[in-house]
Image (cartoon, helix red, strand yellow):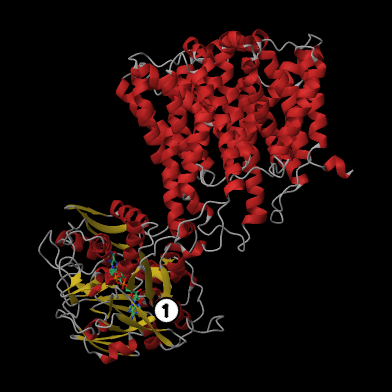
Amino acid sequence: MNALRSWWLAPAVVGGLGGALAQASTNDNVAAGAAGGGGLALLWAWSLRGRVRDLGDGLLHGLALALLLWLSTPLFAAWQELAVACSCDAARERFPELVAAIVCYGAPLGLALGAVAAPPRVAAGAHGTSRALVVGGIAGFAACLLFERVAATAAPFGPVGAGATLRLFGAMAIGAGYGLLFQRAVRGLGQSLGFGIAWGMLWWCLGPLTALPWWRGDGVDWSAAAVGAQYGAFVAHVVFGLVLGLAHACVDKLWFGFFVASDPLQRDREGLGGRAVLALAWGALAGLVGGVVFAPAMWDRGMLPYVAQALGGSSPWFGLAVHLGASVLFGMVYGLLFRAQVLDLATALGSGLLFGFVLWLLGQLTLFPHLLGEPFDWSLPNAAAALPSLVGHLVYGAAMAFVFVACELRHARVQAVDPRWRGASRALVVGSAAPLWLFVLGFGVTLPVVLG
Amino acid sequence: MNPRSRRLCLGAAAGLLSSPLLALSSRADLPAPVAVLLAVALGALLALLAPTRRAIVESLLAAAALGLPLWALLHVIALPLLAGMEPRWTAAAMREVFPQLAGWILFQALLGWSFAVLEALVERWLGPAPVPEAPPVPPPTRILILGGGFAGVATAEQLERAFGGSAEVELTLVSETNAMLFTPMLAEVAASSLEASHITSPLRTNLRRTTVVRGRASRVDLALQRVQVEAEHGPSWQLGYDHVVLALGSVSNYLGMTGVAEHAFDFKSIADAVAIRNHVIDCFERADCEVDAEERRRLLTFVVAGGGFAGAELAGGLNDFVRGMLPYYPRVPRDEVQVVLVHGGERILMELSEPLAAYAQRTMAARGVTFRLKTRLKDATADRVVLSDGEIPSRTLVWTAGTAPNPLLKTLGVEVDKRGAVVTEPTMQVGKHTNVWVLGDAASLPNAATGKACPPTAQFAIRQSKQLARNLLAVLHGEPLRPFRFKPLGALCVVGHHTACAEIQGLRFSGLFAWLLWRGIYLSKLPSLERKVRVVFDWVVELFFPRDIVQTFELGSRRGGGK
Ligand SMILES: Cc1cc2nc3c(=O)[nH]c(=O)nc-3n(C[C@H](O)[C@H](O)[C@H](O)COP(=O)(O)OP(=O)(O)OC[C@H]3O[C@@H](n4cnc5c(N)ncnc54)[C@H](O)[C@@H]3O)c2cc1C
């Protein structure tokens, strides 16, 4: 029993099996897959010894490894073929390997890593399995309801072909799973939003790409062409995931706030309201700067009159005003979501890029067409056509996050000489931030480029 | 080699080690030597930015995550722009630079990995790098602020803002009370429309890095640079300072009338306002069962001395309060209730223009306030107010007719004006004592914008605090000081329900609009969001329910529970 809980056995076995399965589903070199998968899993588990804290954390490390593994496959090609092996066309060809790496290898290995992890001790009341299930279920329910209202056509569980009730139950199960896996890791709204996106991406690979075709008896096809046809479902899963993550964090925070943090003995020194006001003010400033940085590209590409149209105008100057107003507003949202989680340049950059990516999905691909009175279109060609805007949104997010972190760091310097903070440590978000950014952004940006 | 240089070298070495991957993947865009240089520079940057030694996988993943933005910045945006082309952000163009994307993520992963491995190896072989001894830190400059009113608290806040997280100063504030009183809303507390604690903001939660000491400064020794502080129930002690800011405000001045000093209520502190409110309710309770008509009249007559802002606002507020209370005391005759405002001048509200003051007087009179103008207060007893032209039988007298700067100022041995305020330079320093600063009601300070002395108002106290903080910062950093200069924005006065006068930048408003303006402006000035929320709630509750006529316990009494 003890061996089962040791750091190496479960990951090695799961890695070996996963490697074999991945190879079986793509290349048929099962023995090499088992040996390579097991070996790499051992190496990864050894490097992460004592670092992975829980299931969610482990899953993200597994998913990040899967992406890195897929990206590095061309390096094993012969020298003369290297240029070809690295090209985008080759990546398209190798696309099934990416899905296999995620579904068969990264995800199970990550869960195994998480299962053998020793979770750190936390304050009483901070976590709880029943709370995780209930809150996750509620979040899944809420996300599904909202989703079906807004985007019934591209609903993530639509292909099941079952009635709304079953879809709702599916969503609640996915939500409860999210609660179980990520409750311990979530420290804030923004971070939960990121986890939710990763969770949604994984479910896209598991559901529309794998389980559903298999269920329908169509055969599992992970080729770039088949996967490209499911890009709408990808966006749907990401949006569902981010709503789920956000809803979960909101409900959980409410729960935690009401039952734990409201206790005067545990209360925030500045008061939740005070922190929120600060975050809003910094977010507004940061959003404005981000908007200004993004504006020249919008002007250059003649986007501003379109932006103006969203509010019934036509002049580029009006468009600029709308754009800057929206930038400030989104900056404030960013501030609320990511306050107290942005602590240095790296976390700022990661969160800013993630937020830019989310804005692109929700703003450019969804809300903006809606405001123009057009139906929104999450298909691959449309997403590929909007790639310039993705780059712009990423730049906006990064610039905004830099300004925000500058405010946060200034505040932290004042806290350092504030006697009220003596003896109090600031909650640090460590561990899963890097694999999360890597997987979500790497996968999110790679897809439209490779498939488009 | 110190830890920083060691990490920098290791970062550069890791960059060099990983550079082939970058050179290879970016060879279409970057010549190999440039790629190698870039890799080395990025390695050094990584070492600089990563705050502490990371575990190998953490370092690998964190660096790899940065690969995507670096790729986007360089290959999608910067290089095409430098070559005079459109950014490569269309789907087709991005596909061309896809190998570079994979290359960057892998290069960064290798860089993060090799940096962490090199660091671990070097630490194993050579041991941890010796940490150089930190240079001795000069002791912080001690800035001591006396007084926790508008001027003192605003100065502390401004200094906190100016010095941020800098450890060069140490801020201490000594105040008799542990909260700052927002005096413009004091009349509303006396008139029971606001909860007393809602217009005071606690110093310890609002100030961030300032040490708050509750106590009374009893002696300031300018030569030895120290202040004697008396605790309410404890021993006295000395506080040393390098700079002292005197923001001690003013006290009531009864102009030598001992009877008034003995029998009148003050109207300066929160305790005064609560005492007035309780006393007024008590008068009604007593009048309710009083059989002697003379005594009942005395109980129901409320005299306010002084027709300035404080007096007019209090008279207006009290008038609304007592007349609003009448229905709940059915045995109290309506016509016996009187609110009298006694004022020596020809008209009230000399700070406002004549038409506005006339409007205020007219509307107050219409709502039931009686005016005794061109009349001076001579004396007072427990049941009588003696005026220059007669007497008013009354058990309530509130004094707002005179203030004088804090008497402690006269003991400093520096020049004071005829009111007793410290005469300061335009920079707010006191003569040759360049480390002594005075502001607010305690200062006699010329306004460089008008050439006149600043009036004792909160509006000026707050502006002065901003300039004082800037000047103090300038002194510490050897920069030139600036004189205080401020164009007053205007004046606002509320004299009853939906009735106010406002004079802002020469524009005059009255009535409901001025009343809304008053509430909006003062609400925005009330410190802290939390207090604002509480006050708004009080106002909303007051709209729908009768004013609170619960008698609260006597202040200072431990047992409480009413009388
Ligand atoms: C009823 C009323 C209404 C007003 N309305 C307005 C208005 O609407 N607009 C406006 O601009 N102005 C108004 N004012 C004037 C304004 O309140 C004063 O000008 C302002 O408070 C002056 O600020 P200050 O800090 O100099 O003095 P204060 O606010 O009086 O503060 C002095 C502080 O020093 C403390 N203190 C005193 N002695 C000692 C000691 N020995 N040791 C330690 N601490 C000590 C006191 O406790 C107090 O906290 C009003 C005043 C009153 C009384």
Quarter of the image where ligand 1 sits:
bottom left
Find residue B551 and report its horizontal and vertical position in percent: 50, 76
Give the image quarter of residue B268.
Answer: bottom left
Give the image quarter of residue A208.
Answer: top right
Which residue occupies the foreground of this view, B366 or B310? B310
Residue at (32, 67) in percent of width and height: B150
Say left or right for B279 vs A60.
Answer: left
Q: Quadrant of the N terminus of chain A?
A: top right
Q: Quadrant of the C terminus of chain A?
A: top right
Which residue extends farthest right? A1
SS for callout 1: helix
Residue A40 visible to the viewer = yes
Say left or right for A24 vs A407.
Answer: right
Say left or right for B55 vs B178.
Answer: right
Which residue extends farthest left? B451
Residue at (44, 48) in percent of width and height: A409
Q: Is residue B11 above or below residue A264?
A: above
Give the image quarter of residue A90.
Answer: top right
Residue type beneath disc 1: Ala
Which chain is disc 1 placed on? B
Identify residue for label 1: B275
Find residue B141 and report its horizontal and vertical position in percent: 33, 68
Find residue B149 and report its horizontal and vertical position in percent: 34, 70
Find residue B437 and report its horizontal and vertical position in percent: 24, 71
